[in-house]
Amino acid sequence: MGGLRIVSDPTFDEPGPQGYLTKTAGPAFDEAALGPVDVVLVSHEQHPDNLDVRGRALAMAAPVVLSTPSSAAALGDQAVGLAPWTSYSLPRRDGGGALRILAVPAVHGPEDGERDADGNVNCEVTGFVLSGHGLPTLYISGDNASIRTVAEISHRVPDIGVALLHAGAARVPAKFEGRPLSLDSRRAAAAAAVLGVRTVVPAHYDGWSHFSEGAADLELAFREAGLSSLLRKEPHGSWVALRR
């Protein structure tokens, strides 16, 4: 965007166990194929499906990493922790001014789930909204399962045109009685409707054993909601052009 190369929640390890999670598919291509990276966005560093060993190495080598305050503390001096509704600006390489990256709330589990002393469900997680003159406004959900949170973001940032939604209905039996920790397919369709976006790029729905819903579930949910035309589900490793 704006001539900048942005990577979010990078995972480049090969398949296999990663603690209590299991990776079932490797990356579409390796790190070298990305070219120079200007900024890495990390919704949270605590879980390997958002930042595995090689993904962490990529982040640590980037000029700028943006994440939550708690995750930034674990990611080195180049990491900047953003509280919800605070922003960070980067000069664009296309001469169009600045790219603004706004941190927005995320709830990593059920709304009624037990919260820690800081009010977080599961752990502190952030989403991001990227915007700039002449660019589409892009919402990256991070591991958010809350439609109420999506509604708040839509109210405060009413011009979002594209949503990169972490779907997959991630479930871990030991957490919240196995209830989803990220958007399930129907909630992803609901989020698209609430946001009023023109394009949805689904992410974070395959490649790990704890994702309980995949591509077919997403396609069905968007079709049932009358939103099939919004869904841009391209093969992994493909470019998707985003219009303003």
Image (tube, rainbow, N blue to C red):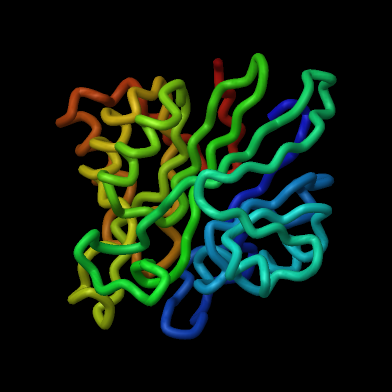
| Rendering quarter of residue 21 | bottom left
Q: Return the residue nearer the eye: 241 or 148.
A: 148
- Vertical position of residue 71 compared to residue 199: above or below: below
Depth check: 243 or 147 in front? 147
On screen, residue 74 versus residue 234, left or right, reads right
Residue 83 on image: x %, y %: 55, 55
Query: Picture quarter containing residue 159?
Result: top left
Residue at 46 percent across and 26 percent down: it is 160
| Quarter of the figure that contains the N terminus | top right
Left or right: residue 122 compared with residue 162? left
Q: Residue at x 34, y 29 (%)?
A: 195
**Up-down relation of residue 63 to residue 186 (above or below):** below
On screen, residue 55 versus residue 90, left or right, reads: left
x and y percent of residue 241 in the render?
Answer: 59, 24
- In percent of width and height, residue 96 lies at 78, 19
Q: Quadrant of the C terminus?
A: top right
Q: Nearer the viewer, residue 241 or 166?
A: 166
Residue at image coords 70%, 58%: 80
